[in-house]
Image (cartoon, rainbow, N blue to C red):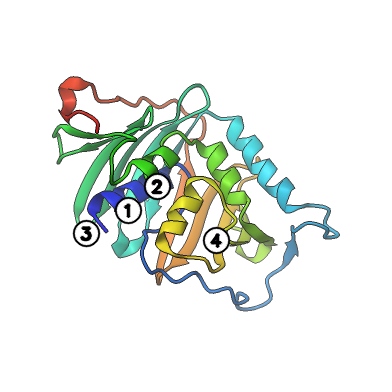
Amino acid sequence: MTHFRRVAVVAATGSLLFVAGCGAHQPAALDKPSGSPTSVSVTAGTQSGTTKATFVRNLLSAIDSKTSVHITVSSGPMGSGAADISYGAGPTTIEARGTENRHRTMFVVARGIVYVQQGPGGKFLMIGKNDPSYGSLLRTFTNIGPHDSVAGFGKGIVSATKDKAKNSNGLSAYRLVVDPTKATGAFRVLMGSSGISELMTFEFYVDSGNLLRRITATVDGQHTIVNLTRWGKPVSIAVPTSSDLVTPAA
C-alpha cells in the first residue's frame, strides 16, 4: 500500500469514515467485555423502546445542527492526525495533517479533489477524480460529509448496546457491532478494499445533545481513538490555488 493510500484513509477518517488503515486486518474481538456492564440493548424491538434507527437518527440530527467539527486521530504506530471539516453550508471541505512513521503530510479536500502538500511549506500535488489509481476512492469520499458518512456506517450496525460501565466525563458509551458488508458509502468501499467481511466492534461516546464525541476500536492489534470536538466552531480552510500546485489534476 502506498503512502497516499494511507493519506486517503486518514482523509476518510476525517470525514467520519472511520477505518484504521487497510490490508489484511483482523476485526476487533466480539467477546463480551469483562465483568457485567450495566447495559441496555438499543436494538430494534427491545423493551427500552429505542431502536438502532433511532440511535443513528439522533446522531444525524445533532450533526445536522452544526456546520463544522475538529477531529483528532491516534492509532499508535499506524500514525496520528487532525482535521478540520466544514460542511452543511456548502460542499464539504477538509484540511488535515497526519503523521505516519514520522512522515508528516498536510492535505486539503475540496470540490472532489485532494491536494497533498509535498513536504512542509511545499507546493501541493492535485489529485482528481479521474486519477487512474485513486479516482474511484476520491469519487467516494471527497463529496461526502459527516451526515452521509454516519448514515452509511449506521446501515451496517448489527447491534448497539449502551454500556453505562464505560460512561466517562458526561459521555454515554455505546458498543456497536458492525457488519462492514452492509455499510454503505466510503466506509463500505474502504472496508471492502481491505478484504474485511467479519463483524467489527466500535465504541461510540455521545454527549447529552447526541453529538458524537469519541470513537474507539481495535484493528489489527492497534487501538485507535478518534476525538470529535469544536462542533459548530467556525473554521477557515484555504484551498490551494494554481500558484500553489505542482501539477494539474489528472
| Precedes in sequence: disc 4 or disc 3 | 3
> Horizontal placement of 173 versus 6: left or right?
right
Q: Secondary structure at mark 2?
A: strand
Q: Which residue is mark 1?
A: 80
* Contact, mark 1 vs mark 3 (Cβ under 8 Å): no
Q: CA distance from mark 2 to mark 3?
A: 17 Å
Percent across and percent down for residue 21 are 36, 58
Label 1 sits on what residue type? Answer: Ser
Q: Residues within 10 Å of mark 1 (few under 14, many from 20)?
A: many
Say which quadrant the C terminus sits in: top left
In the picture of the structure, the residue carrying the numbered disc 3 is 101
Count residues near mark 2 (Cα–Cα under 10 Å), then give few for <14, some for 14-19, many for 20+: many
Residue 75 falls in image quadrant: bottom left
Reading the chain from its start, which is encountered first: label 1 or label 3? 1
Q: Nearer the viewer, residue 95 or 17?
A: 17
For this rendering, which residue is in front, 165 or 153?
Answer: 153
Q: Earlier in the sequence, mark 2 or mark 1?
A: 2
Callout 4 amino acid: Phe
Give the structural element (helix, strand or loop) at label 3: loop
Residue 229 lies, with reference to residue 113, above or below; the image says below
| Rendered residue at 25%/40% (across/down) | 106
Residue where numbered disc 2 is placed: 72
Alpha-carbon span between mark 2 and mark 1: 8 Å
Q: Residue furthest right?
A: 47
Q: Secondary structure at mark 4?
A: strand
How packed mark 4 is, by other alpha carbons closer than 10 Å (few <14, some 14-19, many 20 or more), is: many
